[in-house]
Every structure is written in C-alpha cells, then in structure tokens.
Image: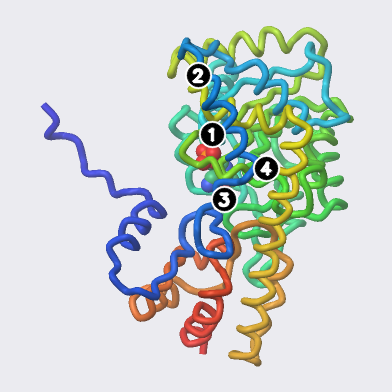
Amino acid sequence: MFSHLPPYAGDPILSLMEVFQRDERANKVNLSIGIYTDGRGIVPVLPSVRTAAAEIAKEVKPYVYLPMEGHGGYRQAVAQLLFGADLPAPEHLAVVQTLGGSGALKVGADLIARFFPQPTVWIPDPTWDNHIGIFEGAGFKVERYPYYDAATRGLDFNGMLGKIDSLPRGAVVLLHPCCHNPTGVDPTREQWEQIVAVIEKRGLLPFFDLAYQGFAESLEADIWPVRECVRRGIAFFLSNSFSKIFSLYSERVGALSVFCPQKDQAANVLGQLKLTVRRNYSSPPMHGALLVARVLSDATLAAQWRAEVEEMRLRVRDMRSKLAAQLKTAVPDQDFSFLLKQHGMFGYTGLSAAQVERLRNEFGVYAIATGRICVAGLNDGNVARVAETMAEVLR
Ligand code: PMP
C-alpha cells in the first residue's frame, strides 16, 4: 500500500537537534535551533507566565471547545498588544487565534489561495525555511526578492526595493517586521518608510510575519511597519507568535490578523478565516491562550512580562557584544562589528558550510550550514569557548 512513499529527508534544523542530543561531548553547544535560553542555559518559564499558570490551575473549568476563531479575551488582548493606540475598529480587523506563528501562516496562506487563484508569494532571500514549505503546501508559487548582501553583511536595500517596485498589483510580499530570521539584518525606519510607500503605490498585499516582537528595539518600535500600514489604510495579513516572547514553544500560541481598510469587509474575512480553521483542525487549544490572555489583561502581570521581554532582549544583545569582542581579540585582522548591527535571536556569522562542519565535528559547536547561529543560545558559560572555536576555524 505505501511502497511508493519516499523517505522524509528530515527538516534541516530539527534533524540537527537530534544529532546534538546524541552528541556525548560534555562541552557541546547548541546554536542551531531558535530557542531562547537564559544565562544558565535553560529555557525559562517566565515569572509572569508562572503566576498566570498558578492562578488558572485554581480555576479548572470544563474543557469545552473554543470557537473556531479562538478565545475571545485572548483575541482582544492580542489585538491590543499588536496595534496599541492604532487599534483599528472591529469592522476593519479580523483576528483569529492560531497554532503558533506557523499556524497563522498556514491559515492565512490557505485563505489567500482560496480566493486569489494561482497565487505567488515573494519571500526574502534568504528567509525562514518553513515559509517555503507552508506557502508551497498551500498551493503558492514561491519567488524571492533580494535581501541579504553577503559582501556588506547587511541589507541589499536597493535590490529589495527595486524588486518589490516591479511586482504586479495584488502580489503577496512576505516581510519580517523585525529580527529577520535567519540573518538578523533589518531595514532601518527610513528604509521601512520607503518599503511601505512602494507597497502602497503598487497595490501589493503585505504578509507580515512577526515572531520576535520586542527582541529588536521594543514591543512598540518593532511593529512600526505594520502600524504604518494601518495609518495609511493598506490591507495586510499579520501572523504573530508567542513561542519566543512568552517562552511558550510547546503551547502553540499565535494569531493571524487581517486588516481590511474598507469598512465592513472584516466580517466576511473573519467568516472565511473561521471556515479555513474548521476545515483544517476545527478549533484551537485553550491553555496557552489562557496564559497569554491572563498576562496581557492584568496590568501588573503585563508590566512584569514587558520587563521580562526587555531582559531577554538585553541579554542577547550582551551576548552579541561579548562574542564580537572576543572574536576581535582572537582574530584581530577581521571585522566582527556586523554582529552588533544585527537584531534578535539570530545572526549570520559569515562562516562557510565547511567551517560550520568543522565547528560541529571538532568542537561540538552546532550552527546551521548557512552560518546562522542562535545568539540566544550563548551565555557566560559558553561564549568564550564558542569565540575560541569560531576563531580556530576562521584562521
Ligand atoms: N516565523 C518565523 C520568522 C520564525 O522564526 C518562526 C519560528 N522559528 C515562526 C514563524 C514559527 O513560529 P511558531 O514556532 O510559533 O510556529
């Protein structure tokens, strides 16, 4: 019956995680997967989340189904967090709870594919690998726009803007509002202003994928391009994830928001989103949404959580500085200042695939073949060794 099924080659990042777990070297370091670990190298339970979990545990209620669109209090709290003072009126905004950021991308992609036949999405080159899988899986043709410039280790802004300025009306453009995965390279505010202006001029449909709000500059600054689209009346899709910024990876909490500049379209969009959910998995799970809703709706817990996000952001920035400084000492003839310009959990190191392989085989330091490292996996206990071993393969 199943003899024609080929083996699954495995996900490049998740497979590496399995190899890491089998590695018996005591000083191994995992910088491959996108997980934030704290100064002790542990995935934290945020204290705000711990308090919310304890409160919720005291109020066990029947486990009835959530509606297709998810938990009402959660959807409201998420919209408030995302849009703040720019929160659109309900007749302009459709928000559904999703299974993490991945679920939001899938529901959004399915909806677009159903109503805009033979869709194409333009994604940055490079991007998070699963963007390709999710959009292709939903029936999209996937095209790329220039993004990373290996020569400057920065943004190829002219290439990016030029390409976006050549796309046909209605084209879907996937954008990372902050902390670009995998490069850590983001447009500046002035560059975003130009990108949004081109999107508006050409009548494109931006699909923002926000997995790291608060990890670049602040919760507000990092979502600026999205809010600018609200202010300018540009329709968009926005997927957001709480996996990293609430450290709730396994709970699968995220949301998909669709902004509808024309009044009274949001009701039909929400209806079609519900149908998309119904056809896929019927309705989302509750616990993770309750945790996030409880934290965001309680002024004390919300303030505590904001401080926790800031603490994570600053810890990663500190690790960038330490890595760059120690690399500079070890390899004085090379420039590592680009590491400090990158934002968020990830960074491109400029290491080649062969150098990454040496790091893993000889030293047990795991990075991705593209040279991407998860800076959030560094801590005071391993950064010196990572710098030394990187220097060793760079010399
Ligand atoms: N988008 C980007 C850019 C990501 O980096 C990630 C997580 N690696 C996701 C989406 C998916 O988030 P989640 O784990 O919540 O599905």
Q: Position of residue 244 (x, y in %)?
A: 58, 46
Q: Name the residue beneath numbered marker 4.
A: 175
Q: Residue at (88%, 30%) from the top-left corner?
A: 85
Q: Give me the disc on residue 81.
A: none
Disc 1 on helix, strand or loop? helix
Q: Decide which of tag 3 and tag 2 comes sooner along the chain.
A: 2
Quarter of the image where the N terminus is located = top left
CB at disc 3 and ligand 1 closer than 8 Å: yes
Residue pictured at 16% horizontal, 34% vertical: 4
Q: Is mark 1 within 8 Å of ligand 1?
A: yes
In space, the residues marked 3 and 2 are separated at their CA atoms by 41 Å
Compute the Cα span from label 4 to label 3. 9 Å
- Marked residue nearer the N-terminal end (4 or 3): 3
Q: Which residue is mark 3?
A: 127
Discs 2, 4 touching: Cβ within 8 Å: no
Report x, y in % for residue 342: 69, 63
Circle 3 packing at 10 Å, graded few (<14), some (14-19), many (20+), is: some
